[in-house]
Amino acid sequence: MLKRHTALGLVMATGAFCAAGLARAQEDSQALSADAHLVLGIDCFKDKKYDEAIVEFRIAANARPADGSILHYLGAAYYEKGSYDESLIQFKEGLALAPAFGDEFSFYYVARLYYRNRLYCGARGWFTRIIEQNPNSKFSGEARRFVAEIDALLATPAENATIDWYYDRGLTESQNRRHLIAEDYFREVLALGERRPAAPRWRSNESRYYLAHLLNKRDACAEALALLDKVDSEALTVSRSAVTPADVTYQRGFALARLDRWDEARKALVQVITEIPNHAFAHYQLGRVEWATGRYDTAIVHLTEAQMLERSLGVGCDYYLGCCHMQRGETAAAKSRFESVIRLCPTDEIGRQARQHLNQLATPVEKHP
């Protein structure tokens, strides 16, 4: 991985650019800067100057934030420095951005990080991936030894207390906003539960819910929905879990809305509001569903209610309320909402879209005879 050839090499462009090519030239310059810092970082890594390598990789990552491959280099540098938690975060974020990127070198780092964090089922998956990719390599030989050790560890089904440890770690990592790592602990609970000889699967319902919640946060909604469909809401009620059936229904509604399954989403969210009338987030999501399906009057009711119940939803509510008013031809009300969004989020994507809508409202509509 650390012998990567850059797409641009390091060839400096010469000559003058015409005005039409200026934007492309600026993009190429930024890419060249990222590649140059990446190469410097690799050189520092080879010389075991890990702090300097991290600085160079950070600069490259900032210049090209959508390139998940750079985060693999950062992860390797943090690993060699001994910052294992930060290393795992970088690899996880890199894999989320670029799931197809990686080779046995980076996979070996990830597998060792999982193993170090006692995520044995996850580690086994990564070591197996190394073996499948290149069965005769040095890394594969190491991977086989780890797989044999992990299989011996997992030969005896985990006790409830062991599963509780993984479950609690998942909750802790989630509270610390290390969501990608939290996902892995909940996945470990589910994997260990599957190895138990008989139902019920200890902590499986709660772990499916929390994992689905985290997946929804990063728009992996199809996977989230598949997990939620397996949650036994009745069992949650019987066990007096902190997770309620309404929580599960809300996450289902959220996922269905993101997947544009409007009728199913509406049904789920209405059910939540019927049970919990002051559920601000259910009102907000239902408002978005109603806006997307052209039911602007109903959308305004739910978005207004959400904004009154939960201040953190204010910007989103203003944006969609502005969209509803715009569709209904209520120009003054729409402008007021979009201006509020821009004041609060001038440089964010939602602010950019609000500004586009304002520009549309300011453009006079041509009347044809």
Image (tube, rainbow, N blue to C red):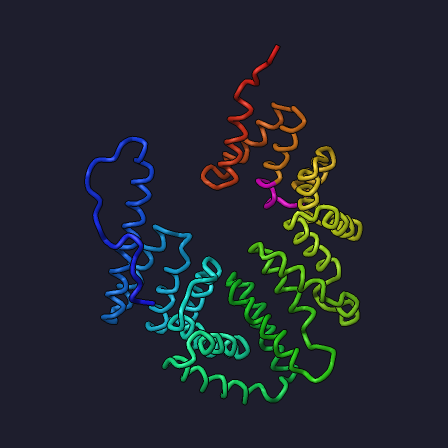
Q: Quadrant of the N terminus?
A: bottom left
- From which residue to which does the magenta span run? 309-316
Q: Is residue 40 left or right of residue 115?
A: left
Q: What residue lies at 49% left-to-right and 60% top-to-bottom? A: 96
**Along the line of sight, the residue nearer the viewer: 238 or 144:** 144
| Place of residue 223 in the rendered image (x, y in percent of width and height, measured from the top left) | 62, 61
Specify the farthest residue to the top.
369
Residue 103 in sight in this render: yes
Q: Nearer the viewer, residue 75 or 7?
A: 7
Report the side of 254 relative to 153 (left or right).
right
* Residue 311 among those drawn in magenta: yes
User: Total number of numbered labels?
Assistant: 0
Residue 358: percent from left, percent from top: 53, 27
Against 17, is 181 above or below?
A: below
Q: Residue 193 appears in which quarter of the rendering?
A: bottom right
Q: Position of residue 68 (x, y in %)?
A: 42, 58
Nearer to me, 297 or 42? 42
State the quadrant of the C terminus: top right
Q: Is residue 33 inside the magenta stretch?
A: no
* Residue 177, image x, y percentages: 52, 61
